[in-house]
Structure formats: structure tokens, C-alpha cells
Image (tube, coloured by chain):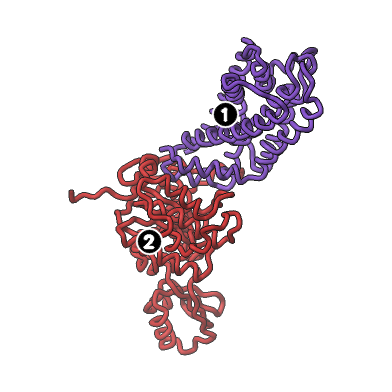
Amino acid sequence: MTSTTYMRFELIRVLRNRRFFILSIGFPLVLFFLIAGPNRHVHSLGGSGIDAPLYFMIGLTAFGTMNSVISGGARIALDRTVGWTRQLRLTPLSPLSYLATKVLVAYLTALITIVVLAIAGSTLGVHLSAGTWLGTIGLLLIGLLPFAAMGILYGHLLGSDSLGPAVGGTTALLAFLGGTWFPITNGTLSDIAQALPSYWLTQASRFASGGPAWSALGWGVTAAWTVLLGTAAAWAYRRDTQRA
Amino acid sequence: MLITTSAVELQGIQKTFRSPAGPVRAVRGVDVAIRPGEVVALLGPNGAGKSTTIDVMLGLTKPDAGTATLFGLSPADAIAQGKVGGMLQVGSLLRDLSVRELVTVFASLYPAPLPVDDVLQLVGIERLAGRRTQKLSGGETQRVRFALALVTNPDLLVLDEPTAAMDVEGRHEFWETVRAFAQRGKTVLFATHYLEEADLNADRAVLMARGRVVVDGPTTEIKARVGTRIIRATLPAADPDTLATLPGVTSADTRGEGIVLRCTDSDAAIRALLERFPRARDIEISGAGFEEAFLELTRAEDDDEEAA
């Protein structure tokens, strides 16, 4: 049994969480203006062929949504440590609906970040057609799948104490190596970056600037991470829920 | 149909936990059947296996042997149909929601919940309705947890040591509400280690100790087995066997010059004692320590098993 009321209140809980606002919206928004503002007239940032405001808009959207989606699943750990998942097991809400609700709510909060950064981008002259926007958002949502799986994995493996550092640290590291702060175009760093899901998430900016969507490598890396983390998350989920 | 399905049916439940000190046999063969509409207390000292039995009954723990059914269904199916409401021993509330919001969410998960406002009033927490759950005291949290169990309007309400964090007045109101709920034909099972709670609020008590059911019957039967009062007195050279035959006395011990009588009827016992032994002095009558009595009962059972 799924419950829209349950989902609505889960969303409300996230929106009342100060940490969510700071990391998923406030931080990317402030950084966007700090970094993109002085560079607003730079075309082809770092030889990437993408205008600086657009590049940083997508880059910081990637940063913010990564945080929303990972912490969305990781919030399972909070429910677990206070005994709430146990309480829920006495209700008709199935463990799978519970999980689906967490992921859906995580994606809804990611959409909030996308909208906020889109508005911020427009103030620095980023204008995309409706079609380009839809395609870009589509790529972002697909690119977030590995992070959703990672969140669920964290939610089942971590305690509530280690949650903040784990989510924050992972997001910062992957965002940095994925080229959120500056384009990574060549060298060893580029080789590493291309094997990471955060790189391809950030690369949605290429499509937004009129280029092609991901290369075959991009689709392959995203799919591989999704399967890998998804399998690990499924294992962790089963380990937690099928104890009975 | 004349045959009604049991609300709860436990058959041959066994559960052993691994621990660093070796295996712990938490439940060793428990059979219990509860009819719909019964209010049953699961009574016993800490470590008797009450919580494990409840966990098995609710499908939260898989037994090593035996089966549990609720209304003829597996625990998982009965829970999926919204027939079960529970208040577990541990667990706090979801943060970042008000009390009313939390109770509303919980109600939304069940097919036939009670109106949220009615339940808030019933449990006496209307004034807390707008407060965030993380700002409640221990006693208030316990009431909200009770509201969560009640709002689901279950056929079977399971309460695992529900009054542990409540003050005296809170307890009184709590049991009044539980009894009113039971009067609507609901089945209630609660775990407690207070005989008094079982006596006042249950039709029947299942006394567990060391993983087994020791007595299953009306609370009067349990009182007869464990005694409700203890008489202590000084009476040199008394014979325990003679003392044990006094009316109202279930067992007697001597400790030096002192005697200890475990009684079902301390009034009759004290009269008989003074009549037969006028030299008895320093007399003291107190409520029985049930923890101790429970353990005595089961120690006897273990000795039987080891001797056999």
C-alpha cells in the first residue's frame, strides 16, 4: 500500500530540515553567484566551449542535487536509529513502498534545487529553450540514479552520527573530481573524472549549450555505477528488512 | 460459524540468540492462544522472554521453531491488512513533524483508522497537537506512541511494557483508555512485569519466566502460586513445615531466628500465626517481591528438567 499522505509528510520533513536547505540549495546558490558572477562574460570556460554562467549553473546544480539525492536515501539511517523502521514494520506500508517514497521525495527535492539554480542562472544571462531545458533536466535525473542508490546504501549501512560527514564528504569529493568547480578537460584527472558518475552529471551542461547528449562512455559509466551501487543497495536493504 | 479463529495462536515457539557468552535460549517452547476480545497480560520478570515472544508474534523475529498466526493469518499478512497495532518497548518518534501530523501520517497507512482528533483527545494530548515531536518529554512521547497504536484502530493491540516511562496518574488514564478500547470487542495483549497491572487490567495472565509459560490463567491463579504478601517475624526454633500449613500461607522459610511466610491471604495467616505462636514478634507484613517469586517458580521447573 502506498500512501500519498505519507509521501507528503516525508517531503515536509525534508523541507523543514535546515541542513537540507544549506547544503542542497543555499550553498550551491551562493557559490554559483560567487564563482559565475565575476566570470559572467567568459565564453568557453577553460577551453570547454561552454559559457561560464551555464557551466557553473549546471555544475552547482549537480552539486546540490547530488547532496539532495544521496541524503534522501541516507535519511533511512535516521529512521532506523530511532527505531522508526521497526515501528513501520507493524503497519501495512511495505518496506518497498517505504523505500520508493524515500527515493521519490529525494528526486522531488532535487527538482527544487534545479528550479532554484535555473532562476539564478537566468539572472546571469543563461537562457535555454524549453526543449533544451527538458532534455537537460532529463539527463540530470538519469545522471542522479547512481547517487540515489548510494543514498540507500548509506541509509542501511551508516549510523546517524556518521551520516553527515559521509554524505558531505562523498558529495564534495565527487563534485570536485567531476568538474563541478572547473572544467576538467585533460590529463590524469580527466581520465579519473570520466570514470565517475558526477563527471557525466556535470556534463549535462554540454547538452544544455547545444552540444550532443552523453557519449557512449557517459551512458556506460552512468549505467555501470547505477547497477553496481543499486546491487549493493539492494543487498543492504534485504539484510535490514528480511531479518524476520 | 461457531468456531472462531484465535486472535493470536503461538505454537511451540523457540528462539535462541547468539551472544559472546554463548547461546541464550530466550524462548523455549511457548504455546499461547488468545480469543478475539480477550485482554491478556504477558507477565514476567526482565529476561523472561516476553519481548522476544512479542517480536515473534509480530513477525519482527523469526523463531527457530514453532509457528505464530494472527486471526488465522501469518503475522506479515495480518499486518499488511492493518489488523495489528503495536506499541513497542523502544523507539522514538519521527522528527520535524508536529504531533498531529505524525498521528495523521500513521492513520493514513491503515484501512479504517479512527479520527485523529478523537484519538488525541482520548489519549489526552490535544494541547500537544501542534508541538514538534522532538520537543516532547519522555512521558509525552510515550502518550504519542500510544496514540499512534490506537489511531490505527487495530483488531489486535499489542503493548510491550507500555507504562514504563509513565507517572502514576499517566498510568491510570492509560489503562482506562485501554479498557475502553477493549470494550469495543478488540483483543489486547500487553507485557508487564507488574502483577498489579495484570491483575487490574487483564482478564487473564500468561506468566512467563526463563523463556517458558509457567502459569496461564486468571490472575487469581497466579496470585495463588506466587503469593501476594510476605510476613516476616522473629520466632526462635520454628519449624518451616508446620508454618507452611497455616491458613493463607503458600510457603515458609526460616532464617536464623526469623521466619518468612509467603501468603495468598495475609489476614488469615497472621491471625493463625499469633494464635498458634503467641511468641512471634517484630512482625512485618509487606507486598511480595514478584521478581523473586517468579524466579523461584522457574528455578523449580529447571531443577525438574535437569533431574529428568
Whole-percent x, y for residue B214 in the image: 40, 57
Quarter-of-image position of residue A24:
top right
* Chain painted in red in the figure: B
Using the rendered image of the protein, determine whether residue B114 is visible from the camera's viewpoint.
yes
Q: State left or right for residue B90 relative to residue B172.
A: right
Which mark, residue B205? 2
Label 2 Cα crowd, 10 Å radius (few <14 / some 14-19 / many 20+) = many
Q: State left or right for residue B93 relative to residue A188.
A: left
SS at circle 1: helix
Please, which chain is the residue tagged with disc 1 on?
A: A
Q: State left or right for residue B47 relative to residue A207.
A: left
Q: Residue at x 49, y 89 (%)?
A: B279
Whole-percent x, y for residue A73 in the image: 58, 35
Using the rendered image of the protein, determine whether residue B296 is visible from the camera's viewpoint.
no
Q: Nearer the viewer, residue B137 or B221?
A: B137
Q: Amino acid at mark 1?
A: Ala
Q: Amino acid at mark 2?
A: Ala
Which mark, residue A233? 1
